[in-house]
């Protein structure tokens, strides 16, 4: 007969190799270890410590999982964990385009 895990027990290392942040390839285990080691308390702190949520999607894909892990590790309700600020992804811009805008050309190649 299988044993049923008590949901109030300490989170185990099950899923420690599960990728939480696909953009930065950060695992659940890395996030949990950082929270425990550095006593992290916010999504922003987890991002700084692990880079989870700092990739191309800026946390749109993984932030809820980061909040869930923080909730489990800190024993707080997930509603108490605020979201981090969302920034739009950046795109590469050629230096010449920036220089053209500065010179007043507007950055259009047709100018």
Image (cartoon, grey):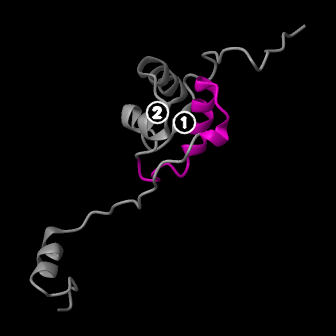
Q: Return the residue found at the far right.
A: 1
Q: Residue at x 17, y 92 (%)?
A: 111
| C-alpha span from label 2 to label 1 | 6 Å
Q: Return the residue found at the far bottom.
A: 111
Dot 1 crowding, Cα within 10 Å, few <14, some 14–19, many 20+? many
- Answer above or below: position of 80 versus 39: below
- Answer above or below: position of 102 versus 20: below
Q: Could you tell me residue 22's position as x and y percent?
A: 50, 41
The earlier-in-sequence mark between 2 and 1 is 1
For residue 105, side relative to residue 6 (left or right): left
Q: Residue at x 46, y 33 (%)?
A: 26
Whether pointer 2 and pointer 1 mark residues with C-beta atoms closer than 8 Å, the reply is: yes
Q: Determine the secondary structure under disc 2.
A: strand
Q: In which quarter of the image is the N terminus?
A: top right
Magenta stretch in the rendered image: 55-80
Residue 2 inside the magenta-drawn segment? no
> Image quadrant of residue 6?
top right
For residue 92, side relative to residue 18 (left or right): left
Q: Can residue 7 be seen in this view?
A: yes
Q: Mark 2 points at which residue?
A: 26
Q: Which residue is drawn at 42% across and 40% down?
A: 24
Q: Could you tell me residue 82's position as x and y percent?
A: 55, 45
The dot on residue 20 is 1
Q: Is residue 62 visible?
A: no
Dot 2 crowding, Cα within 10 Å, few <14, some 14–19, many 20+? some
């Amino acid at each position: 007969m299988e044993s049923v895990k008590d949901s109030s027990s300490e989170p185990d290392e099950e899923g420690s190799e599960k990728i939480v942040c696909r953009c930065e390839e950060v695992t659940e285990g890395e996030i949990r270890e950082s929270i425990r080691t550095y006593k992290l308390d916010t999504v922003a702190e987890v991002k700084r410590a692990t880079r989870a949520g700092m990739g191309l999607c800026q946390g749109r894909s993984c932030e809820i999982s980061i909040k869930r892990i923080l909730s489990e590790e800190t024993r707080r309700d997930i509603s108490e964990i605020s979201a981090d600020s969302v920034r739009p992804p950046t795109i590469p811009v050629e230096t010449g385009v920036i220089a053209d805008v500065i010179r007043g050309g507007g950055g259009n190649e047709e100018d």
